């Protein structure tokens, strides 16, 4: 792997780790706890980059649009496996899953710098997650979100797009 790719992977790993553990920490202690996590990781990233990562995570945790994704009815790093059709098995790890009344919310965190860079790949991935989760929560509305950490943006993916994508996958 080239240095740029290695750095991107490390940023993703650190971000996911912070988003897995910090929601359970009281708000007033999150920054200090996040700094300890980053220190323990002995990251190859400079302190400015680590601070940028931690700030983007803390901002997301304070975002009212994302509150339910990090509440008491949510889970981090959820492994899923489901058979969608004969010979079509999906395996994956959902970054965040939450039950919000009669809905299940799925969030996938993205550390990409640009929203368009891998849009088709991201749509494909979250459509598969949605299909797997639908089999686990029959009758629930499944809502899917892509969370772009470097932009602080939360995009809900409309059901029609996901339905069309899963039809193409299953053909």
Image (cartoon, grey):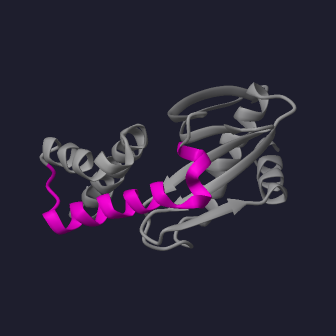
**Image quadrant for the N terminus?**
bottom left
- Residue at x-position 34% and y-position 46%: 18
Residue 121 visible at all: no
In the displayed structure, would residue 152 be above or below residue 141? below
Splitting the image into 4 quarters, where does residue 91 fall? top right
Which secondary structure is most common in the magenta stretch? helix
- Residue at x-position 27% and y-position 53%: 31
The residue nearer to you, when weighing 63 against 77, is 63
Residue 57 lies within the magenta run = yes
Question: 117 left or right of 10?
Answer: right
In the displayed structure, would residue 127 be above or below residue 24? below
Residue 17 visible at all: yes
Splitting the image into 4 quarters, where does residue 111 fall? bottom left
Question: 34 left or right of 16?
Answer: left
- Residue at x-position 64% and y-position 44%: 106
Question: 110 left or right of 67?
Answer: left
| Residue 81 location (% of width, % of height) | 62, 26
**Image quadrant for the C terminus?**
top right
The residue nearer to you, when weighing 11 against 51, is 51
| Residue 10 location (% of width, % of height) | 27, 52
Q: Residue furthest right?
A: 139
Residue 111 lies within the magenta run = no
The region drawn magenta spans 43-70
Q: How many marks?
A: 0
Splitting the image into 4 quarters, where does residue 33 fall? top left
The residue nearer to you, when weighing 169 against 62, is 62
| Residue 53 location (% of width, % of height) | 31, 61
């Amino acid at each position: 792997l080239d240095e740029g790719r290695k750095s991107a992977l490390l940023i993703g790993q650190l971000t996911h780790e912070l988003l897995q553990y910090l929601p359970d920490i009281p708000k007033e202690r999150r920054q200090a706890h996040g700094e300890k996590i980053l220190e323990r990781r002995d990251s190859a990233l400079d302190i400015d980059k680590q601070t940028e990562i931690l700030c983007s995570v803390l901002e997301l945790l304070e975002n009212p649009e994302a509150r339910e994704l990090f509440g008491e009815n949510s889970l981090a790093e959820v492994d899923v496996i489901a058979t969608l059709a004969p010979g079509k098995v999906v395996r994956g790890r959902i970054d965040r899953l939450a039950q919000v009344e009669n809905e299940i919310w799925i969030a996938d965190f993205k550390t990409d710098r640009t929203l368009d860079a891998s849009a088709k790949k991201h749509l494909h991935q979250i459509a598969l997650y949605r299909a797997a989760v639908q089999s686990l929560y029959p009758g629930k509305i499944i809502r899917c979100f892509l969370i772009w950490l470097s932009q602080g943006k939360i995009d809900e993916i409309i059901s029609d797009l996901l339905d069309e994508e899963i039809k193409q996958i299953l053909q």
